[in-house]
Amino acid sequence: MTCCKTVSFRDRLRITLLVVILSLLAACTSAEESPVPTRAVLPSITPDIAAVSLSAVRTVEATAGTTATSTLPVTVPPAASPTPPLPSLTATDTPFTAAPTSVPTTRLIVSPTPSSPATTTSPAASATPPPETATPVPTREVRPIGAAGFPTPLITAIRLETATPTPSATPQESPTPSTTPFPTPIGEASVTTASQQVVNLMQEPSHTATIIRAVASGENMFLIGRAWNNEWYQVRLMDGVEGWIYALYLVVWIDTSRLIVTHLEPTRPPVAMVGSFALGGHVMNLNEDAFGTMHQAGMTWLKVQHRYHHGERGSAVASMVNAAHRAGFRILLGVVGERGQLASIPNYHAAFADFVAGAALAGADAIEIWNEPNIDREWPRGFIHGGNYTDLLRVSYNAIKAVSPATIVVSAAPAPTGFFGPAGCGDGGCNDDIFLKQMAFAGAQNFLDCVGLHHNDGIVSPTQRTGDPRGDHPTYFLSGVISRVPSEFNSRPLCFTEVGYLSPEGYGTLPPNFAWAAGTSVAEHAQWLGEAVQVARTTGRVQMLIVWNIDFNVYTYEDPMAGYAIRRRDGGCPACAALAAAIR
């Protein structure tokens, strides 16, 4: 007897849910892949089962609303076709398992498996279930179609680390060398500073020129030129900087006669003149007492000595200059510095020259450069030499003439002495004649308007050439001092910036170092001053005589200066009449 197993409501619900799920999957796939809906193939079932199924589908659709709408058609086989019996489903039977929803391309086809008459075992109702973890769906890429109909590969830009390329040398044109106004270095000529730690490289061959930079001792350089008198060399440093260095600061290893003269002799101002003859006096105080004494003696010049301190400006002497001019005198300014500063301060000469130039601008009519530089009382021991002094004279002369050509430059009068014997020089200095010869050899005659001289240790009349009880050394006589001036200075006039006779009368005993003048009276003192003016005037070479002194009142064991003064302790001036008579 053949019978149909009744399908329970539970099984029908399962089938209905499966149909709904498949409908939803088909709708999703249709929207993604193609406008054609996917057809689900259902198992062949009897018409009554199909009717129940359709009723269940509509019931689920009505329940789910618009969230589970399906348009999938259901295919029902004809009633006449023989239908095998539907296997029975029990609670232990394996239900159909839908494919994972994460794979959109999967289609599940459900078809019944006929039961064998000899067995009641139900066939497997579904495929092997997929793994629990679904494989993520890759994102579809829409690629353009190339010209040949094939997809063009999609090129994805990838950031790569770019290595910094090694820059290639940029070709440059060789610069056209500029024309230099100076000759090129001669071979491997070089020099090195040696006289001090640092010297200045100057823009021009002058100590007062602009400083380019300091050059250390031992630095090498090329010689590229020289001044007309070989006192300055134009150099090129190893870094190409060019300038001028004073010759005494260099050790030269080549024959400098091969160098081209790149600085010619400048046009020199005319030699300043003081007139046919000028008489003056050295004063301590710029006051009416001193001025009155000088006017009484017929003097038109006065001398003031100023002690220069490094760093001081020339304007410091302006008040003295103005006081002299107001009193009707022309002023000779004797400027002397500190020997310790001279020996220790680099570029002291340039600073000193700057000061005397400022003094000329302040109105000084004449300037004497230093005082008695041939002895260690005024110049550093070990550096006493006429050439060393000429270096100071040179820079001072050039500085003065640059700002005031009319200012008279007088060379420092050496102390008249034969103390250093036949050798002429010793540790403490040089005899005056040797010192003047050294100056002439260094070219001092080119840097002065008047040769300075002193005579202040006479004890006989200046008219005498012999007869001094101490001996006949030339320095004891006025004419003997003049005779010691070298012939190189014959083109220059002579200026006695000190002429004096010492008398202790009215002051007491003289110090031992000045005991040679103990027998000189005030009357002799006055007479000899008048005679000195007369002798000087008759030489034709002496153009200035400054009496040492007018009004000094210091009389000490070291220096009895008041004994030389023409204005004596009582205020009288015995020498004034003799001087006035000699100048007429």
Image: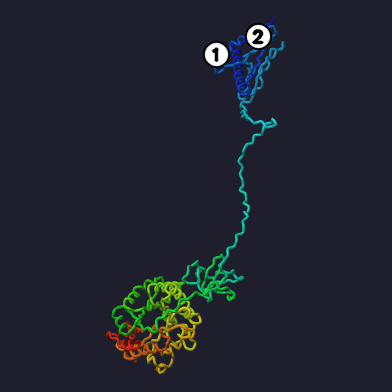
Vertical relation: 460 (above or below) 56: below
Which residue is painted at 71% across and 12% down in the image? Answer: 116
Residue 348 in the image: state x and y as whole percent: 45, 73
- Screen quadrant of the C terminus: bottom left
Quarter location, residue 34: top right
Task: For residue 194, say whether it is visible.
Answer: no
Between disc 2 and disc 1, the foreground one is: 1
Which quarter of the figure has residue 309? bottom left
Describe the element under mark 2 as helix, strand or loop. loop
Residue 194 location, x and y as percent? 53, 73
- Identity of the amino acid at label 1? Ala
176 lies above or below 551: above
- Horizontally, residue 527 falls left or right of residue 474, namely left
Q: Which mark is residue 533?
A: none
| 10 Å crowding of disc 1: few (<14), some (14-19), many (20+) | few
* Left or right position of 99 against 306: right
- The residue beneath circle 2 is 46
* Other residues around mark 2 within 10 Å, as few (<14) / some (14–19) / many (≥20): some
- State the mark number for residue 62: 1
Q: Upstream in the sequence, badge 2 or badge 1?
A: 2
What is the C-alpha distance between the residues marked 2 and 1? Answer: 24 Å
* Quarter of the picture holding the N terminus: top right
Q: Residue 229 versus residue 43: which sits nearer the camera?
A: 229
- Residue 178's spot in the image, x, y percent? 58, 63
Mark 1 secondary-structure assignment: helix
- Viewer-proximal residue, 52 or 113? 52
- Residue 395: x and y in percent read 46, 74
Q: Is residue 109 above or below residue 254?
A: above
Asked whether 73 or 132 is in front, the reply is: 73
Q: Give the color scheme: rainbow, by chain, secondary structure or one colour.
A: rainbow
In the image, 177: left or right of 345?
Answer: right
Type of amino acid at the residue the image marks with label 2:
Thr
